[in-house]
Amino acid sequence: MGLVNDVPLQWFLALSLYMFVLGAIGVMVRRNPVVMFMCIELMLNAVNLTFLAFARYQPSGALASGDVPTAMAGQMMVIFVMAVAAAEVAVGLGIITAIFRLKNRADADDLGSLRG
Amino acid sequence: MTVPNEFSTVWWIVFLPLLGFLFQALLGKRLVETLGAKFGRPAAGAIAVAPIGLAFLLGADLTSKLAQLPEHARAAVSTLGPWMSVQGLQVPFELRVDPLSMTMVLIITGIGALIHLYAIGYMAQERDFPRFFTYLNLFVAAMLVLVLGNNLVLTFVGWEGVGVCSYLLIGFWYRDLANSKAANKAFIVNRVGDVGFALGMFWIVHLLSQNRETLAVTGERWLSYDTILAVSPRLLEMFPTALFWISILLFIGAMGKSAQFPLYVWLPDAMAGPTPVSALIHAATMVTSGVYLLNRMSPWIALSPAAMGIIAIVGAVTALVGAAIAFGQTDIKTVLAYSTVSQLGYMFIACGVGAFWAGMFHVITHAFFKALLFLGSGAVIYAMAHQQDMRHYGNLRRYLPITFATMAVGWAAIVGVPFLFSGFWSKEAVLGAAVNQTHGATGAFGLTAGQLAGWVGFAVAAMTAFYMTRMMLLTFGTSEERWRDAVPDHHAEPVHSHEADADHHDVEDVEGFFFSDAEMERASMLEVHEEHHDLDSHHTPREVPWVMWVPLVLLAVGSLGFVGSWLGGANHRLEAWLTGHAPHEAHGPVAHNLLIGISALAFVSGVGLAFWLYGKKTPVWEGMDDKKWNPLQLFARRQFGIDAILSDGTVRLGGIVGAVCFALDRYVVDGVVNGVGVLARSLGGAVRQPQTGYVRTYATLMQYGAVALVAYVVYRLMTGAPQ
Amino acid sequence: MNVNALIPTVDWRALAPFTIVVCTGIVALIIEMLRPRRNNNLVVGVSLFGLLVAGWSLFGMLGGPSDESFAGMILNDRFGQILQLVMVGSCAVCFLFSEPYLREKRIPFAEFYPLALWSTAGGMLMVSSKHLLMVFLGLELLSISLYCLAGMSRYESKSEESALKYFLLGSFASAFLLMGIAFIYGETASLHLGRISEVLGAASASPLSTIGAAMVLVGLGFKLALVPFHQWTPDVYQGAPTNVTAFMAAVSKVAALGALVRFLWAIGTLDTVWFPLMWWVAVATMTVGNLAALVQNDVKRTLGYSSIAHAGYLLVGVLAAFSAPGRVSLDATAFYLISYAAMTIGAFAVISLTASGQHEGTRFYDVRGLWKRAPWAAGCLVVFLCSLIGIPITSGFFGKLLIFQAAFDAGLPALAVLLAVNSAISTYYYLGIIQAAFVTEEGAVAPRFGKPSASLNLACAVCLAGVLGAGLFAGPLIRGMGTAEVGPPVGVPVQDPLTIHTKNTSD
């Protein structure tokens, strides 16, 4: 706990922003859909980190006033984001598998028949 | 005004023909197909006649009920429910039961039923048999709405309804271009009148909605007759000019429908329709709706002497021009058409001199004898293989005795054989009222407009006697050589859609109104083919079947003198019935007996002249060779160029306007529109460029978008715009 | 700590429609597992019944007072209820024509029904919550189901392609949305929009929450297909099976718009930061959608672009509502959504007729002769397209008219005029579709249509009734929606951030 308290909020935010931008750039430059989705996962992790950091550093008034749902909102959100991300993985991999079955390879740049 | 329950059955008078229409439209064709042409057509025809006949019985019942009421209480309104409700203006569905409307109902349904019956025989060979009765039933329904509606809007609905039916029926044989053109002409010329009607109606709304005082009387039913007519004297005091102009506008409406000069030009062309249509719509009922409108609005129009004078003069001019043109016509139906125009002129003279009831009197008698003449001419045409040119007739009294006898009655009625036939009585009532009209400014010859119109009417009576006698002699008199060695010409009523030629080609199954060019061409080729088994030396005219001559006989009975004397004789029954008060004996400058003398003189001179000229044989100047015609009659035959000037003039003018618009559209509007189109498409091509189909491009662009969004927000925050 | 404070108010009634739809989905899934082969009738029947019950319960709730429950997570107000009703109805109509379509196209995927039901449930959650966690959950429930559905035609490469595109870009957009929510949370320490607007309204705008809001708008703009986040729309609309396209066009647009409206209300300073931005976004969305639609040769793709344009029109309505003096009334927008759902589903339903075997041709020349083969459906198509154009007596006309009027009244004449111009442009391609459907000459590729089934005709009839009914009874309908305003929920006293007059202070 002590260690965490010594690290300023800005550091967490800087790390999460770095992860977020890295993920975003990854989506743009990678061609394998699995890797692209991994980059998106990276962005979601950046989001989780942000939420937790803010939750940790938020003014303590809410918790003291007994408004637990509000006070714990950040942490709750993280759990839900993780759950949703897991669901997305399931669906996403299913789609990628289906494409692999059709084309025997999975390359995002192969999929350009719908355009214009 | 109370709503007595005993009159609510009036709605069925309208609904019955409407049901008939629905039956014919939805099931008629199927019925004929199921039963076969031989039984199906009479069955469909009988089902078409039945509602009209029932409506007649209902009308007769209501009329007798109405007659039992005291004179001042003979008006009732039956309201079905609200219809239009716009900012204080209420136009309900309401029908009016009063002597005028019931008189019209009896004419429409009575004569309508007879003509329906006749049409079963006349149209028996027609492939589109149910379609014909569909239109005919719809016409009767619309006409009944016109005369029964208790407000101008309902009358207008009927007005347009009969216009549409007239259009559809004139163009019934639509595959002939001439018929379609005639239908269009009728429809378009009628629009001119309809604009007048509509403007008059709008003006009434404008006047009544502006005025507090009249609102107290009219309530929200501004357009209902009982309210309009109740406030008209007060309106006269407030807006005399507007009253005059509204009268003129409504009169213009009446002119279009009732074929008054110069809007009569559509009526002769309307003879392109089947003959029963000419009899019902273009002689007995629809064309009299203008007279009905003037009668209905008579308390209003009578307040404006100037408008009355104009109506009388227009009526006189119409009567004169119609009769003069009839001198030169060779087509039997066209003669009758112009005589209708001329007789309608009489009715308007009556309205113009204030004797509205006399106008209605002539409507009644004219309905009988003119329907009779038309149906008779139809019988002749039927017997003569659809030949309509009188120059190919002759001596037909030998072959068509019943037709001849009944048509002779019709002839006697229209030329005004004194006392014995109905036409005499109504004509006498009209012209007597006209020449004895004393109020109003005097003009030419020191006569009032009405008197002038009346004297013109006597001249027209002599002319009528002449041209009708000419028609009868050409048709039934002299010898039959003229059709024995007849040369086929192109005046035949088109027969190409008859069953006879249905065997030759296979367009039978084609439905709807639109045909490809190929089909049109095939149809017109067949028409030429048809001419070969037209009139020839072996042709023997046969008397028509009973469904056709029974109506003729009944109408002939209705044209006899007892009808006229009962209605308009010494007891003045019709005048009392329509005006609601006992007639006052007119004491004009011209004595009653003198009038009868003048009438008789006109009749004798006209008939005598005609017998002298046509009694032995057809004069050369009316033969097949146009060059031998005397110029005056040829000029009459060509309608004195009136139609040409009006139609061609408008067409030319329209053509010039059209050409200008076309050029503007082609080079200016199209240029702009196409330019915009090309621009839009090229822009579209530009915006689709980023749509590469690659998901990574999309992600990149999304990201640029997001970055731009955030950059914008940061910029706004840094420039310190908020708070 | 007060124990009572830990137990939130629970109003199951408010959650009933949502619960019914979710449970129907579960029941449908179970039936699907146990069903006899090649017969989905029971699944369809149960699904429709569930939607009917949900719709009925929603209808019963209309007109009640607006309130919150589940610790502020569920909002029960008129706007949300109307939008939920639209979504439930849209889903039901899609089900009506889905069965013949799936059978005709031989897509063995009865999971369509449960997934679509859950997707609808997600949309319902999105529009009736002011809690960002709930909005996020609803959005993901809606989206993940749709990713599956878009790719359900597993042997069709374009279906899979559209699914992957939708999935990758959708998750990408979700990441932005979540990051934005995180920033807002960092500023306000709350996920509740009421609380957020309270905090934001009290303090001066800070960079963190403003940037966060911008990122949330990316996420919502993606779902609503606003330019520049629209690019997935034509591809996915074209590639996805037609019944899914219809479903997605209606339900996901309604849901996203509902969420956007609630979010815009909360972030406050619309007139200074957001207003010019949204103005340009609206203009760009309308224009790009219509211009790109002009040069398409595929009916579904054209309708995809047209749905972008319609999102622009909707945004105009929202902007007008928010910048209007006096109370915020979303009547025009809600009315437009109703008519949009009816006409767009109807149009796609008719287009679904072109499926035959595993082949489905939706290019303009593929729909030729539709008139001969399915006169009723083709006739309906004309009405739907006329409504999309905005031709009088159809509801599309009144919807556009209302938005146009609202924009004028709110002092946005330029936006109103641009809307009208765009409407005029759109006439071209809609008429192109009508023309294609009514050209009878058979081309080199003979179009093979399935015979329209009774349930498809019924779906067309329902949409027709919606389009014409809403058009003919536009007045009563709008008066009936009268309270469709986004006021602050009862129980959360909020300092009004905008010049919104709430129900308590208006009139």
Image: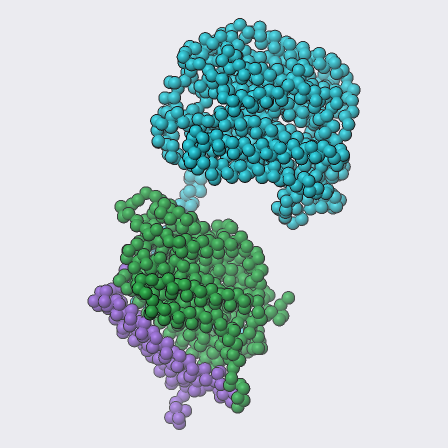
Chain colours: A purple, B cyan, C green
B34, above or below C132, in the image? above
B130, above or below C39, in the image? above
Q: Position of residue C92 (x, y in %)?
A: 43, 62
Between C445 and B361, the one lying in front of the other is B361
C467 on left or right of B566: left
C102 on left or right of B320: left
B419, above or below B181, in the image? above
Q: Position of residue B546 (x, y in %)?
A: 52, 22
User: Is residue C182 in view?
Assistant: yes
Between C218 and B568, the one lying in front of the other is B568
Identified at 23% across, 64% down, the residue is A102
Which of the 4 quarters of the picture holds residue C152? bottom left
Residue lying furthest left: A104
Residue lying furthest bottom: A2
Identified at 50% across, 38% down, the residue is B23
C252, above or below B641, in the image? below
Q: Position of residue B348 (x, y in %)?
A: 65, 25
User: Is residue B319 in view?
Assistant: no
Identified at 34% across, 67% down, the residue is C35
Q: Position of residue B717 (x, y in %)?
A: 47, 74
Q: How many marks?
A: 0
Between C123 and B236, the one lying in front of the other is C123
Which of the 4 quarters of the picture holds residue B176? top left
